[in-house]
Image: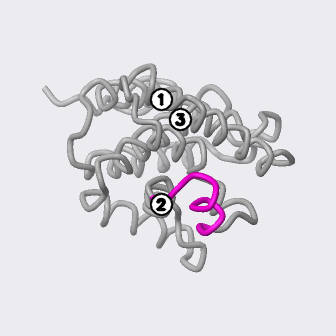
């Protein structure tokens, strides 16, 4: 693995997200993309430097002034392509963005699907470890159901990563007072 590429991506994302906080209002935003890359490497056993770099950069275009051209200039066409696949279209409403993710989950490349699953794992973990301020239990429950639907629509790409997502989702269901979603 090209560790330098990953470290450069983390440094770039850290600079771009430097003033942002997660939805809990306290956690530095950069913790999320780093967590996504860590989930991929640690749980999913992913060693592909482009996938890990794209994981660290996955929200930069969506949430900062970063452009796809800038991603490509710094990290190459492969990383750009992965970041493009997982970047929401900000011209769509939040509900339309979520529906688009579900509708196109099975179209994602293997690398993009890995990032999406790790991203949802990180976000679902935050539902109970660092919930967004002003999010009601009902809103958190709806997010969880949507995240489960989105991951379910992804093509199988990494059993360990997928099993981990479902374990985290089950824990979130318990914390949020929801029925189990386990399939017998």
The residue carrying pointer 2 sits among few (fewer than 14), some (14 to 19) or many (20 or more) residues within 10 Å by Cα, namely some
Tell which of 153 and 62 is nearer to you: 62
Q: Give the range drawn in magenta.
A: 68-77
Which residue appears at 69% of the width and 33% of the height?
31
N-term-proximal mark, 3 vs 1: 3
Residue 37: which numbered mark, if any?
Answer: none
Q: Which of 163 and 86 is in front in this view?
A: 86
What residue is disc 2 on?
A: 77
Q: Give whichever of 15, 147 is nearer the camera.
A: 15
Q: Which residue is drawn at 61% across and 69% down?
A: 69
Q: Tell me the distance, in whole angstroms, between the alpha carbons under discs 3 and 1.
A: 18 Å
Image spot of residue 62 (x, y percent):
63, 62
Q: Is residue 54 visible?
A: yes
Residue at the limit of the structure toward the top, as seen here:
42
Asked whether the residues under the numbered discs 2 and 3 touch, taking CB atoms below 8 Å apart as contact, a structural biologist would say: no
At horizontal 60% and vertical 32% (from top left) the residue drawn is: 4
Residue at x 81%, y 41% (from the top left corner): 25
Residue 96 is situated, as x and y percent measured from the top left of the image, at: 47, 73
Under circle 3, the secondary element is helix
Marks 2 and 1 sit apart, C-alpha to C-alpha, by 36 Å
Does label 2 or label 1 sit earlier along the sequence? 2
Magenta segment main secondary structure: helix
Q: In which quarter of the image is the C terminus?
A: top left
User: Secondary structure beneath disc 2?
Assistant: helix
Which of the marked residues, 2 or 3, is nearer the chain's N terminus?
3
Q: Comparing marks 2 and 3, which lies closer to the viewer?
A: 2
Is there CB contact under 8 Å for labels 2 and 1?
no
Q: Quadrant of residue 47?
A: top left
Residue 172 bears which disc, if any? Answer: 1
Q: Mark 3 points at which residue?
A: 36
Structural crowding at the residue carrying mark 3, measured as other residues with C-alpha within 10 Å and reported as few (<14), some (14–19) or many (≥20): many
Q: What quarter of the picture does the N terminus occupy?
A: top left
């Amino acid at each position: 693995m090209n560790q330098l590429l990953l470290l450069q991506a983390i440094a770039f994302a850290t600079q771009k997200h430097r003033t942002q906080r997660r939805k809990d209002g306290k956690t530095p935003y950069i913790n999320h993309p780093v967590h996504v890359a860590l989930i991929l490497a640690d749980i999913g056993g992913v060693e592909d430097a482009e996938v890990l770099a794209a994981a660290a950069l996955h929200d930069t275009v969506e949430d900062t002034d970063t452009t796809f051209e800038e991603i490509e200039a710094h990290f190459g066409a492969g990383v750009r392509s992965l970041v493009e696949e997982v970047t929401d279209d900000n011209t769509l409403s939040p509900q339309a963005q979520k529906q688009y993710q579900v509708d196109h989950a099975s179209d994602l490349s293997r690398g993009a699907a890995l990032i999406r699953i790790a991203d949802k794992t990180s976000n679902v973990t935050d539902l109970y470890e660092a919930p967004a301020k002003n999010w009601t239990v009902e809103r958190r429950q709806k997010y969880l159901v949507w995240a489960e639907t989105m991951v379910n629509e992804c093509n199988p790409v990494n059993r360990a990563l997928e099993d981990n997502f479902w374990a985290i989702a089950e824990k979130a269901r318990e914390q949020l007072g929801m029925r189990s979603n386990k399939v017998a």
